[in-house]
Image (cartoon, rainbow, N blue to C red):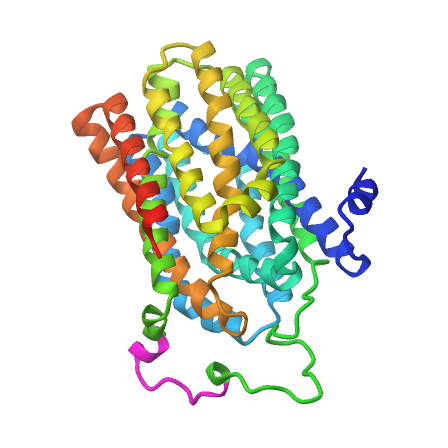
């Protein structure tokens, strides 16, 4: 099937290995996402975690990444991108192993505390993984194929995520608690290991990779040839805010804050208000990724028609429907319908935003630009993860979801009007 795909899309032979391993990486990541990642917050909710504690799961990672973004960017600048991403991914994803044994802890509060501690420790290597993978993707996929590869990765992720979510929901519905969750976490750990394995084989195709062999007559990179920074302000590379990339950073801030505000609310609303069981949640997730799969087949066409910026803006607008419709949901059938609708928005934004960002980053200076993007992303996660439960505490879960959906619509308007 993959070989037929390569022939149909006329992929040059020298790119095929990278594309294949990028597809397999995200396929195995779908196994991780459809099991351990998807059901960790559900598990925490079922053992009594509060909205604040659920929000902390996102906030802790964001705070760590915020502190480490600039040092990680400087560290990546001096290293081979592929090797740096691989080894930090190994350390980060090893953190999924202890989750298998989490239910063995003596009481539920100890388990919640362990989840928070693991989240903190995993966040340290996660910072260079997140930044480095964006750079690796840009180095290993020529710009004219990025929309195609992003779409195919979404399709592959959707298939494995969908199947794994159904399997995880079935396991949790038929195997006694908490053994079912231990099995689901073990499935996720396998996915993490295999995804990392395939990252190892992704190779840079561009001469601007920091550790690639130099061309016969190299052009000096003014960033790398500059003397060491003399103060913290120069090391922060604040000069990036004087470039056109400033607009992308402000767009990122608007989008990501509104993206993460409702995320801590979703598992609480689904479990405690809608009273959904794990099988319902698994089916809903599978349906969500079914439409991610369908939507992903249209990414390349829409990107070419609208351009990456406009495509990103309309994608955020479609993403706004999910929390609004979820707030009006009262039963499992309606939840399934909302999940089907929400998958389209997720497919479009995941296939458009990264390409919009990458097309505005100079090839010779990716780590520094991605470091600032990582700061914006994690500041947004931190604000959204902590503020979401607080707002929900004042307004109620359903009203908060409606508000967050409206804010996403406003973010979409801002993106469409941005330069």
Q: Name the quadrant containing residue 80.
A: bottom right
Between residue 103 and residue 265, name the one nearer to us: 265
Residue placed furthest toward the left:
394
Residue placed furthest toward the front:
305
Q: Do we see residue 418 in this rendering?
A: yes
Residue at the location (51% across, 46% down)?
352
Q: Is the C terminus in the top left, top right, bottom left or bottom right quadrant? A: bottom left
Residue at the location (51% across, 60% down)?
359
In this view, 252 is above or below 372: above
Q: Is the N terminus in the top left, top right, bottom left or bottom right quadrant? A: top right
Residue at the location (46% across, 62% down)?
360
Q: Do we see residue 378 in this rendering?
A: no
Q: Which residues are magenta?
A: 225-236
Between residue 398 and residue 243, name the one nearer to us: 243
Residue at the location (73% across, 58% down)?
201
In this view, 165 is above or below 311: above
Relative image position of residue 341 (x, y in whole percent): 47, 24
Left or right of 288 on screen, residue 373: left
Between residue 170 and residue 47, name the one nearer to us: 170
Relative image position of residue 249 (x, y in whole percent): 36, 58
Left or right of 30 on screen, residue 48: left
Q: Name the quadrant containing residue 2.
A: top right
Between residue 70 and residue 245, name the one nearer to us: 245
Relative image position of residue 306 (x, y in whole percent): 50, 45
Magenta span includes 294: no
In this view, 314 is above or below 375: above
């Amino acid at each position: 099937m993959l070989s037929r795909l390569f022939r149909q899309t006329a992929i040059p032979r020298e790119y095929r290995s990278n594309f294949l391993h990028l597809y397999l990486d995200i396929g195995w990541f779908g196994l991780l996402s459809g099991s351990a990642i998807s059901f960790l917050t559900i598990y925490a909710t079922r053992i009594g975690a509060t909205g604040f504690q659920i929000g902390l799961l996102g906030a802790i990672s964001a705070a760590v990444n915020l502190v480490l973004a600039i040092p990680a960017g400087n560290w990546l600048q001096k290293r081979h991108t592929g090797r740096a991403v691989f080894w930090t991914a190994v350390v980060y994803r090893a953190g999924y192993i202890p989750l298998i044994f989490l239910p063995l802890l003596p009481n539920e509060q100890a388990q919640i505390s362990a989840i928070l501690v693991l989240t903190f420790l995993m966040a340290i290597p996660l910072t260079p993984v997140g930044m480095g993978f964006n750079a690796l993707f840009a180095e290993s996929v020529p710009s004219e194929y990025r929309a195609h590869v992003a779409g195919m990765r979404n399709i592959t992720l959707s298939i494995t995520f969908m199947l794994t979510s159904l399997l995880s929901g079935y396991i949790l519905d038929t195997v006694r608690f908490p053994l079912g969750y231990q099995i689901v976490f073990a499935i996720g750990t396998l996915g993490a290991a295999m995804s990392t394995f395939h990252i190892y084989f992704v190779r840079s195709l561009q001469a601007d990779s920091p550790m690639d062999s130099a061309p016969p007559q190299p052009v000096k990179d003014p960033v790398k040839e500059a003397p060491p920074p003399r103060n913290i302000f120069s090391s922060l590379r604040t000069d990036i805010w004087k470039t056109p990339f400033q607009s992308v950073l402000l767009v990122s801030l608007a989008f990501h804050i509104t993206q993460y505000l409702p995320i801590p609310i979703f598992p609480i609303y689904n479990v405690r208000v809608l009273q959904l069981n794990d099988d319902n949640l698994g089916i809903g997730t599978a349906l969500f990724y079914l439409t991610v799969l369908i939507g992903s087949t249209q990414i390349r066409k829409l990107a070419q028609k609208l351009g990456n910026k406009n495509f990103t803006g309309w994608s955020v607008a479609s993403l706004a429907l999910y929390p609004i419709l979820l707030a009006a949901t009262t039963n499992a059938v309606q939840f399934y319908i909302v999940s089907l609708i929400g998958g389209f928005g997720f497919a479009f934004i995941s296939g458009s935003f990264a390409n919009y960002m990458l097309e505005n980053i100079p090839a010779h200076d990716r780590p520094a630009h991605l470091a600032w993007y990582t700061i914006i992303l994690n500041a947004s996660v931190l604000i959204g993860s902590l503020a979401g439960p607080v707002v929900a505490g004042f307004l109620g879960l359903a009203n908060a979801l409606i508000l967050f959906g409206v804010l996403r619509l406003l973010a979409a308007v801002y993106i469409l009007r941005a330069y």
